[in-house]
Amino acid sequence: MAFIDVLRQQTLKYIAYDPIELSLIPVVRSTTVEGGVSIVDGPVRDPQTFKLIALTSNQRLTLTVAGKERIIDYHLMGAHDSIMEVGDHWSDSDGNWYEVHAIQAGHGYERKGLVEQHRTGDV
């Protein structure tokens, strides 16, 4: 068995320890006639199994997205062949929503996104 296969199996075991099943919603961007950008939700992706890893206060980093600073709350880890892109989002049963702001460089054995949580009532 190739070393990459061993790493992929270990990733799947790690995810299986505390999995979350999500149907991510992608965003579709298109240029408008006026030259602006239209952003709408695309078709919901098929359910996939991920691990949502909460970052501690000293692990949290910030990203600047469209001129606004975003604090990253979670890593969203999936199998190497999971489908996750920047802009994908989902909601939980409490009405909070989560947005993927970046994809970390892959190693061939996992796919990991940087996620910001928007809590119900946040402006």
Image (tube, rainbow, N blue to C red):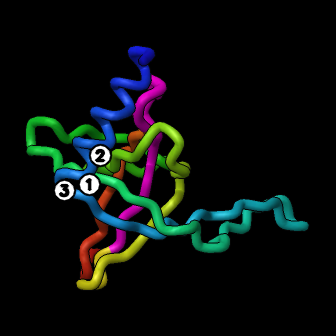
Q: Secondary structure at mark 1?
A: strand
On screen, residue 119 versus residue 56, left or right, reads right
**How much space separates mark 3 and mark 2, taking CA atoms?**
13 Å
93 vs 102, nearest the viewer: 93
Residue 60 x, y percent position in the rendering: 19, 41
- Which comes before the other along the chain, label 1 or label 2? 1
On screen, residue 48 versus residue 53, left or right, reads right
The reply to whether residue 110 is visible in this rendering is yes
Look at label 3 and name its amino acid: Asp
Q: In the image, which residues are magenta?
A: 97-110
On screen, residue 64 versus residue 76, left or right, reads right
Toward the left, the furthest residue is 57
Residue 40 found in image quarter: bottom right
**How much space separates mark 3 and mark 1, taking CA atoms?**
8 Å
Residue 50 x, y percent position in the rendering: 35, 54
Provide the residue designation for mark 3: 18
Magenta span contains residue 98: yes
Look at label 2 and name its amino acid: His
Q: Are marks 1 and 2 in contact (CB under 8 Å)?
A: yes
Magenta span contains residue 2: no
- Residue 105 numbered mark, or none: none
| Label 2 Cα crowd, 10 Å radius (few <14 / some 14-19 / many 20+) | many
Look at label 1 and name its amino acid: Leu
Residue 79 x, y percent position in the rendering: 42, 43
Residue 42 x, y percent position in the rendering: 66, 70
Q: Are marks 3 and 2 in contact (CB under 8 Å)?
A: no
| Label 1 Cα crowd, 10 Å radius (few <14 / some 14-19 / many 20+) | many
How many labels sit on residues?
A: 3
Position of 123 relative to 93 (above/below): above
Q: Quadrant of the image for the N terminus? A: top left
14 vs 32, nearest the viewer: 14
Q: Secondary structure at mark 2?
A: strand
